[in-house]
Image (cartoon, rainbow, N blue to C red):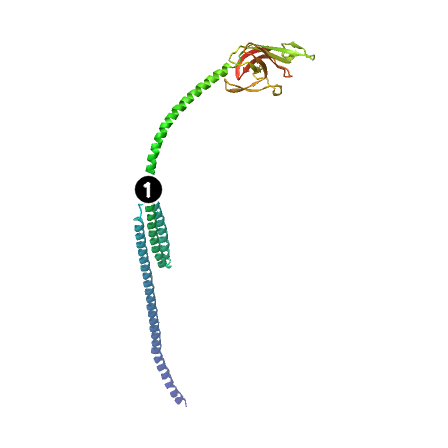
Amino acid sequence: MSTPSNFGQTPTTNNNFENNNNSGPKRMTTIMGVAIAALLGLCLFLLVSKYKQGETLESTSMELQEKNTAFTELDSKYNEAVTQLEQQKGVNAELDAKINEQLQQLQTQKGQIETMIREKRDYKSAMARFEKQKNEYLVQIEDLKKEIGILTESNTQLTQQTQQLSTSLNETQGKLQEESTAKAALVSEKTALETEKAQLSKKVDIASAIRVKNIQVKSVDVRKSGKEKSKAKAKNVDKLSICFTTEPNEVVPAGEETFYLRIVDPTGAPLAIESLGSGVSNDKRREEEFRYTTTASTNYSNGETNVCGAWQPGQNFVKGKYSVEVYNKGYLVGTGAFNLK
């Protein structure tokens, strides 16, 4: 019974061995198929990538070429515009200034278009506007030239008129010069006469001043009764009486004459109280003002006349030497002095 059992198992072992031998080649085939598929996929990927890269490079190259072409075109248009505008210069300063302004504006436009080219914006329409602007500038220049031509003609006419007027003016100036010379001679003669007249008038004015002499000052104490008594001490003096004598003067017509009395105290200050008749007058010789103390008037009859004036300030006098000045018609005509103890 056992022998048949072992006999029956031997064929099974042979079948397994045959299966194992067949699976090895199949696995290898599968691996190689996968590897080949992977290689084919990689090759396909690389081929597609290279194709796209080539397209990108070609596109970039075309863009660069287009930009270079655009920059070249722009430079050409700009240089042409500059040449055309520069050729218009030399007519006058006003037109040159206008052209310089236009050149500056075109340069600004050129910079803007260059930026548009770099940024891949619509530069072609801007390029067209650039060309149009240049043509408009040339038209403006021609218009200005026409205006300048008209102005030049007008200036020529004005120049001719100016020359005629200048000739007439020179003739008129010549006549005026002659008249002016004659007038200057008359003015000089008149000035000399007026100077001589002023000098004579001043001499007459000085001569008309009545000189005085014998100036006497009496210092008195005025009592309550009204009586006056001479005093020499300053503390006892209430009033000063100034008297003098006029000298004969035939130049002065007879009539009322006023003399201005100026009393100067020991400190050099003039005695003056406005409410008591003091005031200001002119010293014609020194050409300056002076303050006077009081006045004295008389009916002058061309001879010696005694004249007196008084000064009673209502306040004490100071000790020392006093001076007295007498003025008539603005001139100093006499001086005197006195002392108070």
Is the residue 89 above or below the residue 274 in the image? below
Extreme residue toward the bottom, this view: 1
Near-viewer residue (281 or 113)? 281
Q: Position of residue 138 (x, y in %)?
A: 33, 52
Q: Position of residue 184 (x, y in %)?
A: 39, 25
Q: Quadrant of residue 5?
A: bottom left
Q: Position of residue 200 (x, y in %)?
A: 46, 17
Quadrant containing the C terminus in the rendered view: top right
Query: Visible in this render: residue 341?
Result: no
Is the residue 15 above or below the residue 118 in the image? below
Quadrant containing the N terminus in the rendered view: bottom left
Reading the image, the residue beneath label 1 is 157
Near-viewer residue (212 or 185)? 185
| Horizontal arrangement in the rendering, residue 79 relative to residue 242 (left or right) | left
Near-viewer residue (107 or 7)? 107
**Count of marks placed on residues:** 1
